[in-house]
Image: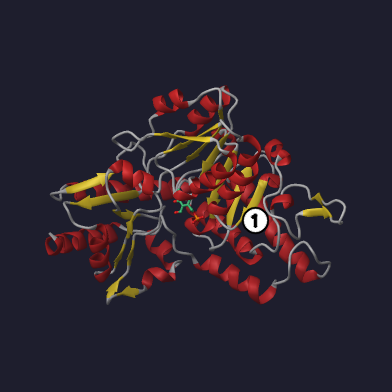
Amino acid sequence: MYDIAKIRLDFPALDREVNGRPLVYLDNTATSQTPRCVVDAVTAGYYHTKANVHRGVHTLSVEATELLEATRRSVKDFINAPSAEEIIFTRGTTEALNLVASSFGGMVLGEGDELILTEMEHHSNIVPWQLLQQRKGFIIKVVPVTSDGSLDLDALRRLISPRTRLISVCHASNVLGTVNPIAEITALAHSHGIPVVVDGAQAVPHLTIDVQALGADFYAFSAHKMYGPTGVGVLYGRRDLLEKMPPYQGGGEMIESVSWAKTTFAALPYKFEAGTPDFVGIAAFARAIDYMRSLGIENIAAHEHELLYYTTARMMEIPGMRIFGTAPGKCAIISFLVGHIHHYDMGMLLDQLGVAVRTGHHCAQPLMHALGVEGVVRASFAAYNTIDECDRFLAALHRVIPMLE
Ligand code: PLP
C-alpha cells in the first residue's frame, strides 16, 4: 500500500509555503527533497562520528570508516554490481563522468579515433569529452533523436565504425524523459568490442538498476537526485577496466607508497578516491537507499507514472501546448512550451503561485538546438507528489497562460 500522506510527512520541505501559497515542488529532476531519516543521519554524523576515515585507529575514525564502507556495500547491492571495490565515491555524476573521460577516455581515445555520444546528453556527458578531445584530437559522433524523443538506434548502428573506441549515453534524458534501451546498446557495442559509459543520473531515482543485466561498463549517478545528500555521487566501473586505468586525481588515500623516486597507487576503489571524501554525506546516502527500498522502486515508478499520464493528458487539452518527449515508457518528466510564451516568464509566474518548475536549456543546449528552441519549461515528479499537486500545477498553468499570451 503506497501511503502518500505518510510519505509526505517524511519531507518537511513539502510543508512550506512559497509566495504565500503551499509549495508544489515539481523540480525533482534537478534535485529531489530529502527525507528526515537522511537529514538525521547527516546530523548524527556531525554530532557523533565525525572523524576522518581510513586513517585512524581510534574508535570514532573506525566507526566513520565503517559507515562509509557500509554505504559502499549498500550501493553495490542497489545496482547489483559484482563487488564493492567497483563502487567509487565521487562528488556527483559530473565528477564521475569527468573521471571516466579523463582516465579511461585518455587511455583509449587517440588521434583519429571516434567517440559516440547522443543528441540528448546533459552537458556533463559532453563537455568532459570535449576537454579531452582538445588534448587528444579524436572525433565525436552524435546519435540523433527521433520526433518522439527516442534515440535513433539505426543511426547508432550506422555511426559505429572500426575507429569507434567508446560510446557514452544517458540511461534517461533529463529533458525528454526518454529511457534508453541500454542493454540493447551495450549488446550492440560489445559485439564490436566497444565499451559503454552510462550516465544514470535520471534513471536511478525511477528504475531498478542492475548494471550487470544492463551490461554497462561504467555507470554514473548522484545521491541528491535520489532523496540523498548533496555532494555525493557514484561511479561504478568494471573491475578489469578500473584496474588498467590511471588515477584521476592525486593526493592522500589513493597511494600505496610515496617517495621522490616512485609513487605506487592503492588498490580499488581507493585509487580513485583522492583526499577526504564527504564521509558524512556518504554515510547518510545509505539511509536514502534504504528509504527508496522501503517505498519500493516499482511502487515509486508506478506512482510517478500515474502523475505523468494524468498531467500530460490534461496539458494536451491546452491550446498551443507543445510537449517535448513522448517516447513510450518515459520517466515522469514533462518538458513543454505554450504558444510563443517565453519559458522564463512562465516559470516566474508559476513560482508566484507556489509552483516550482525549472526553465531554460537544462544543461542540454545541443538538444535544445535540435528541438529548435532556446529553452523549455520542465515539470518533473517524485515519490511524494500528489494528484492534488498536479491539479494545482494545471490550475496555475490555466491562470498564467492568458496573462502571458
Ligand atoms: N546527467 C544528467 C542526465 C543529469 O540530469 C544531471 C543533472 O541534472 C547530471 C548528469 C549532472 O548531475 P550532477 O549535477 O549531480 O553532477
Quadrant of residue 326 within the rendered picture:
top left
Residue 13 left/right relative to 348: right
Callout 1: few (<14), some (14-19), or many (20+) C-alpha neighbours within 10 Å?
many
Quadrant of residue 351 within the rendered picture:
bottom left
Identify the residue shown where x is 25% and y is 71%: 352
Identify the residue shown where x is 33% and y is 36%: 328
Q: Position of residue 10 (x, y in %)?
A: 46, 66
Q: Quadrant of the C terminus?
A: bottom left
Q: Position of residue 96 (x, y in %)?
A: 58, 50
Identify the residue shown where x is 23% and y is 51%: 337
| Nearer to me, 100 or 43 | 100
Identify the residue shown where x is 29% and y is 42%: 371
Say above or below: 371 vs 263: above
Say above or below: 298 vs 398: above
Residue 64 left/right relative to 30: right
Say above or below: 392 vs 15: above
Secondary structure at numbered mark 1 = helix
Q: Position of residue 271 (x, y in %)?
A: 73, 50
Indicate the amino acid at tag 1: Thr
Q: Which residue has dot 1 on it?
A: 71
Residue 314 left/right relative to 299: left
| Nearer to me, 215 or 5 | 215
